[in-house]
Amino acid sequence: MTTQSEILPFEELTPAARRNVYWGFIWRGAVVSIAGAIGGAILGGVLGFIFGYVGSALGHDVHQIMALIRVVGALVGLVWGLFLIPYLVRWIFRIKSGLYVIRLIRLDDSSRV
């Protein structure tokens, strides 16, 4: 049996409920940040090894190889971070804090601000 839930603006939550929502965002963001750092370190290490090995085997200057590794590493880190964002957003919308959940509500055209 489905019941109609009350739509409650965030400002009307009790301070304790707001703290629970904040805490839910903080620890989930921290977990995704740590996953991003670990994944970025692994990807950066593998790519750095490959680029360093291939570059030195081809006789390129070490400084050129290091500059290339920095650029490629930054791009791979950006892509990895963008890859993780949808997981964070889905996870946030699954937060159940006591009696509350976070949901998106479609507004009709007349109620838009």
Image (cartoon, rainbow, N blue to C red):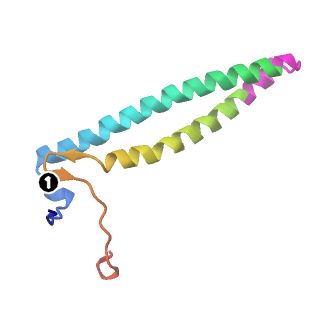
* Quarter location, residue 98: top left
* Image quadrant containing the N terminus: bottom left
Q: Nearer the viewer, residue 87 or 71?
A: 87
Residue named by callout 1: 13
Q: Nearer the viewer, residue 22 or 91?
A: 91
Q: Around disc 1, counting alpha carbons within 10 Å, would you say few (fewer than 14), some (14 to 19), or many (20 or more)? A: few
Residue 63: x %, y % from top left: 78, 21
* Quarter location, residue 87: top left
Outermost residue, front side: 1
Residue 34: x %, y % from top left: 43, 29
Residue 43: x %, y % from top left: 60, 27
Say how many tags the image has. 1
Left or right of 90? Residue 85 is right
- Identify which residue is drawn at 16% across, 62% down: 8
Q: Which residues are magenta?
A: 56-68
- Identify which residue is drawn at 38% across, 32% down: 31
Left or right of 65? Residue 38 is left
- Identify which residue is drawn at 69% across, 33% down: 72
- Identify which residue is drawn at 71% across, 27% down: 69
Residue 7 highlighted magenta (yes or no):
no
Left or right of 58? Residue 23 is left
